[in-house]
Image (cartoon, rainbow, N blue to C red):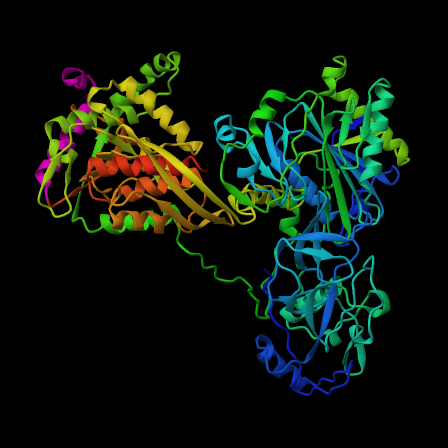
Amino acid sequence: VCIHRVRSCSSIRFIKSKYVCVFDKSALKFSHQQRLFRTSAVSCGQIVQFKLSDIGEGITEVTVKEWYIKEGDSVSQFDSICEVQSDKASVTITSRYDGVIRKLHYSIDDIAFVGKPLVDIEIDASKGVASEEDVVETPPMSHDEHTHQEIKGHKTLATPAVRRLAMENNIKLSEVVGTGKDNRILKEDILNYLAKQTGAILPPSPKAEIIPPLPKSETVPAAPKDKARKIPIPVSRPIVFSGKDKTEPVTGFQKAMVKTMSAALKIPHFGYCDEIDLTQLVQLREELKPVAEIRGVKLSFMPFFIKAASLGLLQYPILNASLDENCQNVTYKASHNIGVAMDTGQGLIVPNVKNVQVCSVFDIASELNRLQSLGSAGQLGTSDLTGGTFTLSNIGTIGGTYAKPVILPPEVAIGALGKIQVLPRFNGKGEVYKAQIMNVSWSADHRIIDGATMARFSNLWKSYLENPASMLLDLK
Amino acid sequence: MVLQPSLKNCLGLSCVLRTPKAGFRSTAGGALVIQSVSNDVYQNLAVEDWIHDHMDLEKRQVLFLWRNLPAVVIGRHQNPWQECNLRLLRQKNIKLARRRSGGGTVYHDLGNINLTFFTSKKKYERMENLKLVVKALKALRPQFDVHVTDRYDILLDRHYKISGTAAKLGRTSAYHHCTLLCNADKFVLSSVLKSPYKGLKSNATPSVPASVKNLFEEDPSLTSEMLLDAIVKEYAMQHQTDHHITLINPADETLLPGINNKTKELQTWEWVYGKTPKFSISTCLNMAYKGSVLDVKVNMDVKHGRIEVCNIDLPEQWLPPALYSKLVKSLTGSKFCPNEITALVTTLLRVCPQDDELHSRWNLLCENMIMLM
């Protein structure tokens, strides 16, 4: 549905003759203020029945499939009114007039007849309906439709689109020189007028004109060159911004997220952050990557992070627990179903790797591959997305260092991993070396988890990753 | 057949056009033949939109040739759930597109040629276009028994459909496009065009199924190039124009300003699924639970691709009433999309009582509901 500014009804000094409206300057000022209103009591236009025109191929009837407007909407000439279908052909019917839709003669799926009224449009009789080009099957237009605005005794011919452009830039049509047929004012004339005012050449609207690339420059596209010449110099006139706020209802998955996050924030969170030196892990992964590839699996860092977390959870099982609604009981979950936050087209979803406690790093990598490809194809199943007990969010792949992750109920802890950065650090001998540093930010439920537990878990997890060989000792 | 690598070569500086509807100009006569270098269904449909919206077809006509990687294309007013096996499409990674013209559903792959005839509204004439194609086929292989039906299909041997037609008319211009089966995968075609969804009631345009055959089955010595060449030759002759094919790249924003936005719009969920006319589903879920089978009646109204009304007839207390109500409230207004609903129901489960029995019932019900989509 197009929402158009309703133009002034010019009812200030409306002489009830059919086609002459006389303005003076004061009336124009007034009419700008009144621009947005149209009181229903004052119906200064007449109702015209817009008939369904000939479609060709001898077709006499069509089915109405979709309305683009509803009763009460304003339309401009050439706006789409509805879509009809006849025998495999879909036809877009456009308006011949500017005005307000007063009546739709058909509902969806009704049969509409060629030559019979389709919609009733109330035309504002003071406006001109000079058409830009010949409408193929125009019936003879009535007197009322060939109205021209008379401003200071001059006839100004201009299409509605041109009039709108003039109005939006506060230009009086009477002051513009028309270069079209019968001194018709064209869009170029408005632009030239503006250019003279501001001393700049405004870029023409991209829709109307196609500027083919200059044949000389084969490699460089014409666009940047043109842009350089056409940077508009700030105009002294107020710039009209016609953007509108857009309100949509919160539905579906978004609605579910609202519920979940509201519940999550009821959990008293505390945070704990640390820095991990992944220099050795980076090296190890480089060595193992080709081995995994031979077996058909893409190996990232996540499988190591996940396995190390599971080893840590074996020592601190309270982090893999769940608190019931009334905070009466804590359930220690036997399975480590570690969730991995994924950013998809829909937003944040968290599939989990089941039973990490009995999986090898390779098993985890393989499962992650499966979940990632399903995730990007939008085909994750309910079992992939439920049953999680602990979550890791690798936000670092997008960016960031430290974060403040929100626990996903019914879990009690979550870790956010920042990006890996190469930073200078001191080694045991006091020398500076290139270290691969990643930050981790944990959040935990302070009702059942205390800072010391979180810190010790984090230290253990950190030690496994900083010295991957130590993982071998505790691997189950 | 002369191929011009880009349109740039046939435009001179004098062609900086200022009229709102611009047209490509070439040194040849009143008709232009263009071929897409892309096999992306959305990009190619966007080219049709672009030509329809921006080219001045009063002075010249255009023939557009294009082929797509596997895709199902539904008509403007059709219901994808009614027309094809969406589950299979997703599994096989076959794209789904909704075109702007009317008509029925077709399956495209590289073994199918698409032809679009662009004219002014006055010169819109589908029969003539199809007769041109038949003439070209007969010129290439005189022994072929091909003819045009009054439903604008082209039949081979009086029985097998080798081409289907659809059209779009605007304010001043129109286009008529048709398919031509050369060497398409008939097995995939028949399996994807069979809908598994039961209980759908809708006023959307239904497709008329037909037996199909590939031209290459009739004569294995044929190639797509030969067919395209024959058609272009016939077109060029009838329009008194040069036998040139200009290649165009549907991603070229400089040549076709605004084309990328058109391509994006054609891929949005709102266009592909959201434009489905209102429909209702009345069906029965057969859920196997703990040794017995539950018959659960489901009634849903779907408007603009979203669930407007949802009723699930569960046995009493099978789910706690509060939970059932939460589920129905969340489904209402949501997209009728398995991905969206899966994410929705699994997220909702986080704030439900943590009871294994409850969770397994919830998951069972939701999985069955998702199968309807």
Q: In this view, does B94 lie to the left or right of B99?
A: left
Percent coordinates x, y for residue A329 in the rendering: 9, 41
Percent coordinates x, y for residue A176 in the rendering: 75, 72
Q: In this view, does A455 lie to the left or right of B233?
A: left
Write down the quadrant of residue A307 in the picture.
top left
Q: Is residue A458 left or right of residue B155?
A: left
Q: Nearer the viewer, residue B15 or A306?
A: A306
Q: Nearer the viewer, residue A323 or A365?
A: A323
Write down the quadrant of residue B222 in the picture.
top right
Residues shaded magenta: A448-476
Percent coordinates x, y for residue B364 in the rendering: 32, 35
Q: Is residue A450 magenta?
A: yes
Quarter of the figure that contains the N terminus of chain A: bottom right
Task: Give the residue drawn at x 57%, y 45%.
Answer: B265
Write down the quadrant of residue A181 in the picture.
bottom right
Main secondary structure type of the part rendered in magenta: helix
Q: Can residue A169 be seen in this view?
A: no
Percent coordinates x, y for residue B215 in the rendering: 74, 20
Q: Does the magenta stretch include residue B139?
A: no
